[in-house]
Image (cartoon, rainbow, N blue to C red):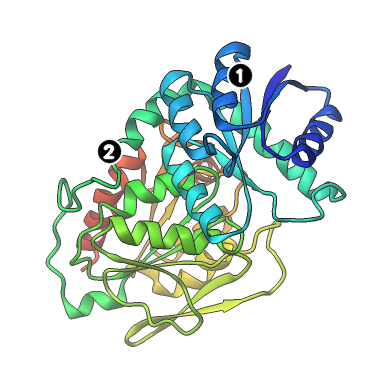
Amino acid sequence: MIRILIADDSIFMRKILSDIFATQADFTVVGVAVNGRDAIEKVLELKPDIMTLDVNMPIMNGLHALKVIMREAPLPVIMVSSLTKSGADETIAALEAGAVDFINKGNTNIINSRDISDSIINKCRAAVKVRGKLSAWHINSKRVSPFYSVTEGRPAYNSSAAGCTRLVAIGTSTGGPKALQDVITKLPADLPCGVVVVQHMPPGFTKSLADRLNQLSEVTVKEAENGDRIEPAHVYIAPGNYHMVVHKDAAGGIISLNQEPPIGNHRPSVNALFNSAVPFGKSLVAVIMTGMGNDGAAGMLQIKKAGGYVIAESELTSVVYGMPKAVVDLGIADEVLPVDEIANAIVSAIKRNQ
């Protein structure tokens, strides 16, 4: 039985979430909390297996409470966020601080939508499985912070104009914001190629993620726009609810966004990005990191056949070892690495393909 604590200042949301979990034989709601301070007390008292934690609450907000909880009594936490600029920014900060995933409560159909209810349940089931790794991740997350030196421990690279025709493509999902922070903040300012990223995330949150990474990185990070020319030392993150594809040309590549049907329930889709990047062939370094399911595996297989270099995150550091495992199981990964070694591996792979 999965013992869950619900922390939300809204009576409406507490009832909705309680009702959702009440329909599941493997969940039991052990308590509710009405603010951040109450949430901390209930965690220490009830010792739940997992909790949902509202971002915006009185007395003590969810982000502050999360930091205390991750220090005093770490457990899997799913944030509950509103789709506002401040809500999105704080959600990204919470994912950096140790939250496993988040729920967007801005969807007014949450109470009637079976798909949304199933998504919440599936996120919580996946999150509870990671409890044993929380301490290691929390320690690892301290390596990159607002006070992180952007020059410390970075691999150096002497760029050249010819490097513009190379490309790095990254796909990730659950646990991805923290993984991306650990990778992108370690890329050097003279990286000779662009990086395109698909992170499964709703609209609004991808902009906050890009802005946050841009603050911490030497490379320039932005939410991708239709028609963006891929430039060296630039990272482009697919906006929520849009597929991102790349088109190779003599100068490198151009980004296109579209709202074609979701692929495997995902938009943006890692497979859509990876399949479009196949023409880069041996000039492509493709990376798959933490996430549920197998999005990206089919595209990665085509990349491998075209001569691209394949890097997968190892089970050791994956929040959810689903997407990387699918690639590893295909036997196509050139390297399987913990997340803190991936940036160096990317730079080394680019050097080998000069």
Query: Residue 42 shows which numbered tag?
Result: 1
In-image side of 166 versus 42 (left or right): left
Q: Is residue 109 visible?
A: yes
Which amino acid lies under the numbered mark 1 shown in the image of this protein?
Lys
Local secondary structure at mark 2: loop
Query: Residue 143 shows which numbered tag?
Result: 2
Q: Residues within 10 Å of mark 1 (few under 14, many from 20)?
A: some
Front residue of 255/185: it is 185
Comparing marks 2 and 1, which lies closer to the viewer? Answer: 1
Which residue shows up at 43% across the image and 81% down it?
228
Task: State how far apart marks 2 and 1 are (Cα).
Answer: 29 Å
Residue 123, position in %: x, y? 66, 38
Above or below residue 324? Residue 201 is below
In-image side of 279 versus 141 (left or right): right
Which residue shows up at 22% across the image and 66% down it?
191
Quadrant showing the C terminus:
bottom left
Which residue shows up at 52% across the image and 48% down it?
91
In-image side of 25 versus 156 (left or right): right
Which amino acid lies under the numbered mark 2 shown in the image of this protein?
Arg
Quadrant showing the N terminus:
top right
Residue 112, position in %: x, y? 87, 49
Front residue of 68/117: it is 68
